[in-house]
Image (cartoon, rainbow, N blue to C red):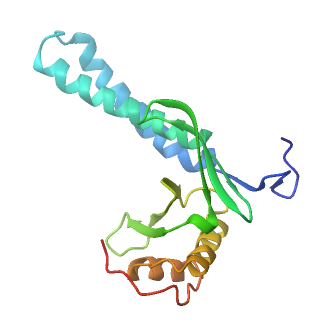
Amino acid sequence: MRRASDGQTEGVGQRHRYPVESLRGDYFRAGAGLAMCALPLIFASPFGGVFLVFGGLATMFTVYGLRAWARQMTVVDVTETVVSAAGPRIISGQIASRVTLAWEEVRAIKLSYYSTKRNHTDGWMNLKLKGAGECLNVGSDIDGFSAIAAKAAAAAKANHVRLSESTVSNFAVLGITVGDTGRRETEE
């Protein structure tokens, strides 16, 4: 498929990706952690405790780096009728997978905010959509996150999805008024 110059993808709607710039820190942390674990592994006995500890840490940093790569490869397509994500799934071991969810089938929406500072001035959001046996997660570092969140809010209203107070509050931070979607849920 050709990518049009206005951000539209022919036959798909809006196409969203995680920019490499937003993943550089993850790549750096994975590489630095792996490098720091590799040196002790070179000199450690393969059956010693040092090998087990640093081998486990090296594995953890490798998985962290692979997850960053998987996010970079992920493409989220949004149309008037569906939202889908395609890309590698590191945890499940699938090299390529696609999750597609029709907006009319969305039955649960959670917009979470994760702060990196005590004063809540820095952090990220995660949008989780569930329905029809599918679950789709989108992080706020993807390009066009606000547009995806706005479509999710519209789906919440159209489908009378119950939202937690924190989800409603997080939509408001994005400048999106959810309105009355049904009875509010308490936080999970």
Residue that lies at the very extreme toward the bottom in this rendered image:
180
Q: Nearer the viewer, residue 88 or 104?
A: 104
Residue shown at the point (62%, 68%) measured from the top left: 104
Residue shown at the point (39%, 29%) measured from the top left: 62
Quadrant for the C terminus in the image: bottom left
Q: Nearer the viewer, residue 187 or 120?
A: 187
* Residue 91 at x, y percent in the picture: 41, 36
* Residue 145 at x, y percent in the picture: 62, 64
* Residue 1 at x, y percent in the picture: 83, 41
* Residue 143 at x, y percent in the picture: 66, 57
Q: Quadrant of residue 93?
A: top left
Q: Quadrant of residue 154?
A: bottom right
Q: How many marks?
A: 0
Residue shown at the point (88%, 53%) measured from the top left: 5
Q: Is residue 34 left or right of residue 27?
A: left
Q: Nearer the viewer, residue 3 or 92?
A: 92
Q: Is residue 73 left or right of residue 181?
A: right
113 up-or-down from 82: above or below: below
Q: Is residue 38 left or right of residue 78?
A: left
33 up-or-down from 84: above or below: above
Residue shown at the point (52%, 78%) measured from the top left: 171
Residue that lies at the very extreme toward the left in this rendered image:
49
